[in-house]
Image: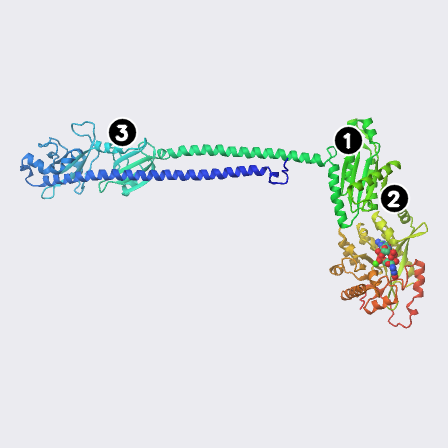
Amino acid sequence: MIRLSSSLFARPALFVYAGIGITLATTAVTVASLYEMRLDAMAQARVAAQNLVISLQKEIERNLDIYQLAMRDVATSAETPGILRLTPEVRQLVAFGSAANTTELGALFATDATGKLVLDSRSIQPRKLDVSGRDYFQVQRLQENAGLYISAPFLPFAAEPGIPQIALSRRLKDKDGHFAGIVAGTLRLNYFRRLFEDSILGRHDTITLLRTDGTVLMRQPFHEGDIGKSLAVGHSLEPLVRSSHGTYIDIAVLDHIERLYTFRRVGSYPLVVVVGFATDDIFAGWRKRAITVGIVTVILDSLLILLSLMFSRQLRKRLAMERRLKRLAWFDALTGLPNRVQLQREALRMLTNANQHGSTLAVLFIDLDRFKRVNDTQGHAAGDEVLSEIARRLQDQIPTGDVIGRLGGDEFLAVLQDCDVLRAKQVAARILQAVYEPILINSKQDTRITISASIGIALSPHDGEEPGILLRNADLAMYQAKGAGRNQVRFSAPEYERQAKEQLELEVALLRALRGNALNVAYQPKVDAAGVLCGVEALVRWENNGQGIAPDRFITIAEESGLIAEMDAWVMGEACRQLAEWRAEGLNVPNISVNVCAADFKRPDYPGFVSDTLQSHGLVATDLTLEMTERVLFDESVPDIRKSLDAIHDLGIALSIDDFGTGYSSLSYLHRFAVKELKIDKSFVQGIGRDAMAESLAQTLIHIGKILKLTVTAEGVETRAQRDFLGTHGCHLYQGFLFSRPLAARDFARWVRAHRPCTLPGDPDAQATTLGASPD
Ligand code: C2E
Ligand code: CA
Ligand code: CA
């Protein structure tokens, strides 16, 4: 099976989006090209209509021109005086000689002023007709400047019944210029009908011949009723009258069909030829193609979307299956915890990490005691419930970043990084406690079961640096725990066992000592260059079973077991009580320093506690100095530690930076927290005379203190040479075995009495200074 989860395929929705995207794009392109095709169809129709209208207009104009010329000859003849005196044959020849080829179109004739025919192209003896009622006669008679007039359609008097005609007429004048009749030519409209019929194209296409006043003279397709109708009410007449040619789209007045109309004025005649192509016909071809293209596009697009949907669904299913398989492969189905395979991977990763960073790592092998009995007596369903519940509890006990998994059956494994003996023991103890809580089994009608566990611990690198070896050692240790009576923790290495046991015992003993007031405080003087006492540092001491325990050791235990704050509070109270007592005895001790750590600040209102302590012994703020390492200032685990420091400063209590030079040495915070004193760490002091590097560092640290106007105190001064070196470079105060070891209260009082300034008579500057006074 190809791994999908790491590729583009890990996002099935993408394929649906892509499908929709492609569909939209192709649809847009299709719509655009269809639109273009539509425009093309229209353009082509326009060209065709224009060509047709031009050819029709030319043809009609040519014939009318011929007719007009013939009419002019008739007119000239009619106006010639004495024409009626010629013989009829000659007269006919003179008048209609040039009209020989116009018989196709109709008849030419002239009338007198009363409308009676005087010359007639149809017969040598003019027919006895009176046209005085015709419009073409009336117009000429009444309008002097009518010019060439084209009549409305009319039916002839006789013959060819039903075939309408029009007539062209001109006015005849006598020699005085008065109306003397008309010359006229009738035009059978059939001529136009045939002309138009020959040109017609589509079913809904039209060709119309109009008078410019909107009267229809001929229209194709032919309907008798159309002839003589007026289109003057139609809105489309306007452009026809105004310009000589043009094109527009309109709905026909006569049949209400939308057409593309192209028109042209017939020369100078008051006639217009209009060709109309139905837009339906124009777009018929296009529509067919559009429908085909549309259907194909819709089918293709639907197919594409369908395919992408199917593909993404398929993909989603496959991904889900892959995830399920992965879970099956890496996680335990019952508890959801990492399984053996996953544990091995994780352990390897954490071990590699630990080896790289030189840190320790603990492997806890956890095995439930007599779990088989639960299965046997309560059934497997109950057994499963127990395992699930235990898994949950175990997970709760494991810090984030560490791992707990199920090896199988009732065996669990925890891997804890950055974990030493003590912490491993603590976590194991918590696990034992959590497992031992009664478990409620619902499937057995709320039966309660109590079960214990045995835990074996192996530590890396001591017990091995490979997961397999660590696991085996932890397993062996677990068997020892079982052998020792179950519900126990055992370390793989015996010395750890001892160490952990001791540690635990010490913890208990320390708690007892603290609560039983069995701790002590030792006092170490701080002196100036002249040996004058300037302060004293309180250092906690513990004697367990007559054996002194190194402060560094039991302070670590106090920190790890959470006792430190209580212990420091006790030391502060004791130191203040002692200072007050000395003063009551008349001993001049200017100031007392106590050591504090970050955990002390976790107490709500620590500043309040400090000031209460001072007050309860009748002391003031300037009597106390708090010593802390740089790390305390930056401790993130205590909220608002900086606010507390500000509050303490506001009380007037001095802050001193302990072990200066070994921490962050960021100078800005010294100012920020209104620090009063720097204590140069004894490692620099003790390097004086031995280590050039330490010497120059000590020098630099003193320099920093001087620049920042802080009291610089050197701790761990053991030799005169050290004191002299520090003195020459401007150190203000000294503390160390050279002056005194930390002493019991009574011994300290004795030391003070023995070192009264008066015992140094050779030193007139000798004078007790308190911290906070400018050292310069
Ligand atoms: P620190 O605050 O740096 O205390 C000075 C340490 O130097 C003390 O060690 C002191 O006995 C030792 N010392 C003094 N003069 C000399 C000397 O000339 N040579 C040498 N080699 N050492 C000298 P101690 O008493 O073992 O305390 C160790 C650390 O424990 C202290 O270091 C301080 O950080 C912490 N500590 C002591 N008492 C308390 C307390 O009440 N509360 C807290 N939180 N920490 C305390
Ligand atoms: Ca200190
Ligand atoms: Ca120190």
Q: Residues within 10 Å of mark 3 (few under 14, many from 20)?
A: few
Mark 1 beta carbon near ligand 1 (under 8 Å): no
Q: Which mark is residue 223?
A: 3
The residue lying toward the viewer, choosing from 298 and 182, is 298
Q: Earlier in the sequence, mark 2 or mark 3?
A: 3
Q: Residues within 10 Å of mark 2 (few under 14, many from 20)?
A: few
The residue lying toward the viewer, choosing from 587 and 51, is 51
How far apart marks 1 and 3 lie (CA) works out to 98 Å
Question: Is residue 236 left or right of 367 when viewed as pictured?
Answer: left
Q: Nearer the viewer, mark 1 or mark 2?
A: 2
Question: Is residue 372 left or right of 131 when viewed as pictured?
Answer: right
The residue lying toward the viewer, choosing from 397 and 411, is 411
Res. 742 image quadrant: bottom right
Amino acid type assigned to the residue bearing label 2 in the image = Pro
How far apart marks 2 and 3 lie (CA) works out to 124 Å
Q: Is residue 688 above or below residue 218?
A: below
Determine whether the residue tagged by mark 2 lies in a helix, strand or loop.
helix
Q: Residues within 10 Å of mark 1 (few under 14, many from 20)?
A: some
Residue under label 1: 385
Tell me the quarter of the image containing the N terminus: top right
Q: Which mark is residue 494?
A: 2
Residue 295 x/y as whole percent: 46, 32
Amino acid type assigned to the residue bearing label 1 in the image = Glu
Res. 10 image quadrant: top right
Res. 17 image quadrant: top right
Does the image show residue 162?
Answer: yes
Q: Earlier in the sequence, mark 1 or mark 2?
A: 1
Determine whether the residue tagged by mark 1 lies in a helix, strand or loop.
helix
Amino acid type assigned to the residue bearing label 3 in the image = His
